[in-house]
Amino acid sequence: MPSEVQAREMAEQEPLRFGIIGCGRIAPFHVDALLRVPGVRITAVADVVEAKAEQLAAQVEELSRQLELGGSAGPGGKVAVHTDYRELLARPDVDAVTICTPSGLHPRLGIDAARAGKHVLVEKPMSLTLRGADRLIEAARQSGVKLGVSFQNRFNPTIVRLRQVLESGRFGRLSHGVASVRWRRTPAYYQEDSWRGTWALDGGVLMNQAIHDIDLLQWMMGPVAEVSAMIATRYRPIEAEDVAVAAVRFTSGALGSIEAATTLEPADLEETLSIFGERGSVVVGGLALNRLEVWRFADMSPEEEGRTVVETEQAIRSVYGTGHRPLVADFCQAIRENREPLVTGEEGRRAVELVLAIYRSAETGRPVTMPLTEEAESIVKAQEALGIWP
Ligand SMILES: NC(=O)c1ccc[n+]([C@@H]2O[C@H](COP(=O)([O-])OP(=O)(O)OC[C@H]3O[C@@H](n4cnc5c(N)ncnc54)[C@H](O)[C@@H]3O)[C@@H](O)[C@H]2O)c1
């Protein structure tokens, strides 16, 4: 988050004007986060369903009023509503966009936005294919715009503290890391929005829910050398997987394990990241990585574990957590300071690559070595059929 001085300076600069593309469930988190960044305005929103765009525009106007941002929402305080995102991209009063549409559309929309000269913050996953991720990264580079990916859990106080201790070398050599997502997504969740769980637009629990944890596991443990995996669709009404297990070997020689499911009954259970090293063990858990379950180091004072648990615990209202505010603030600051955001396109691609390697291993029944060179056939075929293969 920006310091007070930085916040004042940001507020005094020219406003940074955002458009939001895709006005469904996650979009209000972007509205909430963007309007709290000093000097940021939301001038336009777009959704193929006009009523959804209008509803989000009304939320922007209402929150702008509550935060006393005056006419900041746009000319006369009104937010422009579009049903074609290309009209939003043609607006001169939009400097940057956040992309909150179904995942399979992210590369196409992101590339168009970058080519229109807009900075791009894209929801996770940035793409369901390597080709889409590469093309989006290249489009942003060529246009000289910033590209960020919405891995907001990197900003959780628990994860920030874990990353700090890891960088300090306090763990010693790492032996292994474990990521597990044990959540419940009901049949209604999938049936309400027809894109969910499809190969063309979403993928399964790995590509949608666990990609956050796959990103964090790699961020902590380093690059992956090899992966072996199995996936299954046990009883959720979807094309892609509702449960998956994977074994990973990192280039450091450490091992990793990933377990992800939306099949839990009768309720969400946990989202947990465990890191084990020569001189310490840390388990970040809670419903959504919001609580330290274990913080133990060989060189630790007796009170350190309790104190660290209290300092980093966060109450959350949903599994999306509270990270969108600091993530969005970092992205805006990156634009202002002409630096890279904390979560770059390359970082977003790394997580997609590991998910695709897991899919590839599951498809072939063989271990997959990295870097990955092949796409997942199920996704490519489905995207070709829909005409959205990038
Ligand atoms: N970071 C997180 O924790 C988090 C949480 C939830 C969702 N997400 C991601 O956000 C994205 C959206 O998820 P959601 O749950 O909000 O989905 P949603 O279905 O609720 O919303 C998507 C919206 O995009 C609109 N849309 C579809 N095609 C469009 C187009 N061509 N142009 C403009 N709008 C279009 C739909 O009408 C819909 O309103 C997904 O990629 C998802 O993975 C991220």
Image: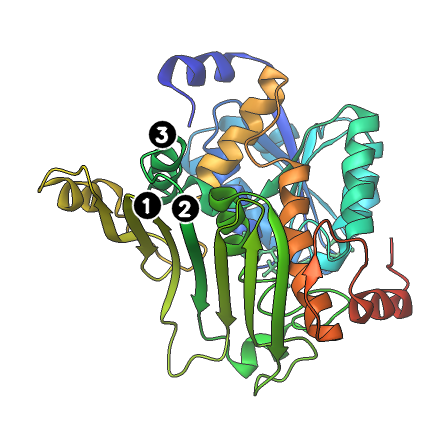
Q: Residue furthest bottom?
A: 235
Q: Is residue 10 visible?
A: yes
Identify which amino acid the numbered label 2 is placed on. Leu
Mark positioned earlier in the residue sequence (2 or 1): 2
Q: Which residue lies under the disc numbered 1?
A: 278
Q: Residue 382: percent from the left, percent from the top?
A: 83, 70
Mark positioned earlier in the residue sequence (3 or 2): 3
Residue at horizontal 69%, vertical 68%? Answer: 361
Number of residue marks: 3
Identify which amino acid the numbered label 3 is placed on. Ser
Which of the four quarters of the rendered structure image does ligand 1 lie in?
bottom right
Q: Residue 276: percent from the left, percent from the top?
A: 35, 51
User: The residue tagged with tag 2: helix, strand or loop?
Assistant: strand
Of 175 and 18, nearer the camera is: 175
Q: Which residue lies under the disc numbered 3?
A: 168
Up-down relation of residue 115 to residue 84 (above or below): above
Q: Residue 244: percent from the left, percent from the top?
A: 56, 73
Whole-angstrom CA distance, mark 3 to mark 2, is: 13 Å
- Circle 1 residues within 10 Å: few <14, some 14–19, many ≥20: few
Mark positioned earlier in the residue sequence (1 or 3): 3
Q: Is residue 63 visible?
A: no
Up-down relation of residue 234 to residue 100 (above or below): below
Residue at horizontal 57%, vertical 51%? Answer: 27
Callout 2 touching callout 1 (CB < 8 Å): yes
Q: Quadrant of residue 43?
A: top right
Residue at horizontal 45%, vertical 47%? Answer: 153
Q: Which label is found at residue 174?
A: 2
